[in-house]
């Protein structure tokens, strides 16, 4: 078995590791290190840590995060549709319009149910 075949793979792995580790080492060596109490304090979700780490979060926090991801991904589908609008023709336009209508209905339903209200 000829091990010369694996030299490009080995070089690829070594270069990948170097690209991943070298900037971190350079930043650690050359970067300023001036810790203060504010930098060393724990910071989670916009408020100070004051109780057990296993405390319960309000479900609305997760709901808003999931809804943001959902609508963000759905609107990302609109960009390729808009770019290819000339090629997909009138039928593609109506399918994309239907997608936007369903997206809007979901958004209005979510709004009416109070999923976006934050007290």
Image (cartoon, rainbow, N blue to C red):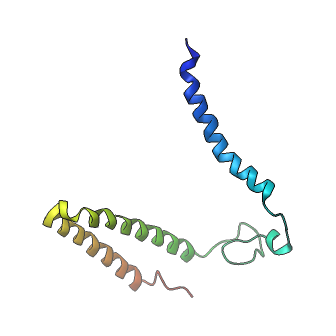
The residue nearer to you, when weighing 113 against 6, is 6
**Residue at 77% in and 73% down:** 51
- Quarter of the rendering containing residue 83: bottom left
Residue furthest bottom as drawn: 119
Total numbered labels: 0
Q: Quadrant of the N terminus?
A: top right
The residue nearer to you, when weighing 106 against 22, is 22
**Residue at 32% in and 67% down:** 78
Residue furthest front as drawn: 30
The residue nearer to you, when weighing 31 against 13, is 31
**Residue at 85% in and 73% down:** 37
* Residue 115 at x, y percent in the picture: 46, 80
Q: Is 18 situated above or below 60?
A: above
* Residue 81 at x, y percent in the picture: 27, 64
**Residue at 78% in and 55% down:** 28
Q: Quadrant of the C terminus?
A: bottom right
Q: Is residue 8 left or right of residue 52?
A: left
The residue nearer to you, when weighing 75 against 116, is 75
Q: Is residue 117 left or right of residue 37?
A: left
């Amino acid at each position: 078995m000829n091990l010369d075949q694996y030299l490009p793979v080995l070089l690829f792995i070594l270069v990948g590791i170097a690209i991943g580790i070298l900037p971190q080492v350079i930043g650690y060596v050359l970067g300023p290190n001036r810790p203060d109490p504010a930098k060393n304090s724990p910071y989670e979700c916009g408020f100070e840590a004051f109780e057990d780490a296993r405390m319960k979060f309000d479900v609305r926090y997760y709901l808003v995060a999931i809804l943001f991801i959902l609508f963000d991904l759905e609107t990302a589908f609109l960009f390729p549709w808009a770019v290819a609008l000339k090629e997909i023709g009138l039928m593609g336009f109506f399918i994309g319009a239907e997608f936007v209508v369903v997206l809007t209905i979901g958004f209005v339903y979510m709004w009416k149910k109070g999923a976006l209200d934050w007290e």
